[in-house]
Image (tube, helix red, strand yellow):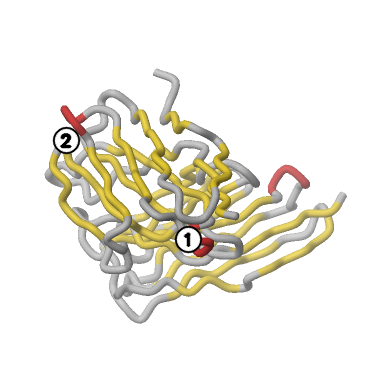
Amino acid sequence: DTGVSQDPRHKITKRGQNVTFRCDPISEHNRLYWYRQTLGQGPEFLTYFQNEAQLEKSRLLSDRFSAERPKGSFSTLEIQRTEQGDSAMYLCASSLIPGQGRQVYGYTFGSGTRLTVV
Amino acid sequence: TQLLEQSPQFLSIQEGENLTVYCNSSSVFSSLQWYRQEPGEGPVLLVTVVTGGEVKKLKRLTFQFGDARKDSSLHITAAQPGDTGLYLCAGTPSGNTPLVFGKGTRLSVIA
């Protein structure tokens, strides 16, 4: 397994356009997470999936953002009507589901998609 | 919202020096993790600490989880230029919820 893959690595788009990012997690990992990171900040949680079910969305996530994980494999994150404030690094991570007796597994992150809205 | 405060925000030191960075919260976390991130890449897991008072060592890096599980520290001995990067702490209030990240400490080790 080559780890978590994200595509594209970079995306420049005009304000108002729609963009879609793809994430391929580690195949054995049931959980998939999307985070957003801006300059000088740590990753900010957006949403996560367990298998194909979307379990949580951040209250900070506007209605312009939507994510899917069909068949519990790869995931896509779509941003509609992009705004300059959407410019950021979008990070995808995957992990195993916490098991009994173990509180959390580490996340494996992809290299991210850097979005620039002009 | 569970907040993790990291300090210092920036740190620039000479090769061979020792340093400690801190991760603090007013809330209890079931576990804390430390990640290191290089420019243009995603964070990479360094360690997970789950028990109050726990100390873990990874070569020249020593991680400690506070007794009350509200804080953690990362100590680097004899820093090297390869240690340069953004160090992030992340925690979960329970094992089942997504990680919350601090803003990170940006470390620069000058040769």
Q: Nearer the viewer, residue A101 or A98?
A: A98
Residue at x 28% of width, y 40% of height: A32
Residue at x 51% of width, y 46% of height: B43
Neighbor class of circle 1 (other Cα within 10 Å; few <14, some 14-19, many 20+) is some
Residue B95: x %, y % from top left: 21, 55
Name the quadrant of the N terminus of chain A.
top left
Q: Which residue is mark 1?
A: A83
Q: Nearer the viewer, residue A87 or B97?
A: A87
Q: Which circle, 1 or 2, is nearer the viewer?
A: 1
> Label 1 sits on what residue type?
Glu
Tell me where residue A20 sits by quadrant.
Answer: top left
> Label 2 sits on what residue type?
Asn
Secondary structure under the numbered disc 1 in the rendered image: loop
Residue B61: x %, y % from top left: 59, 51
Residue farthest along the top direction in this orientation: A1
- Horizontal relation, residue B1 to residue B54: left or right: left
Res. A51 mark? 2
Task: Identify the subunit bearing mark 1.
Answer: A
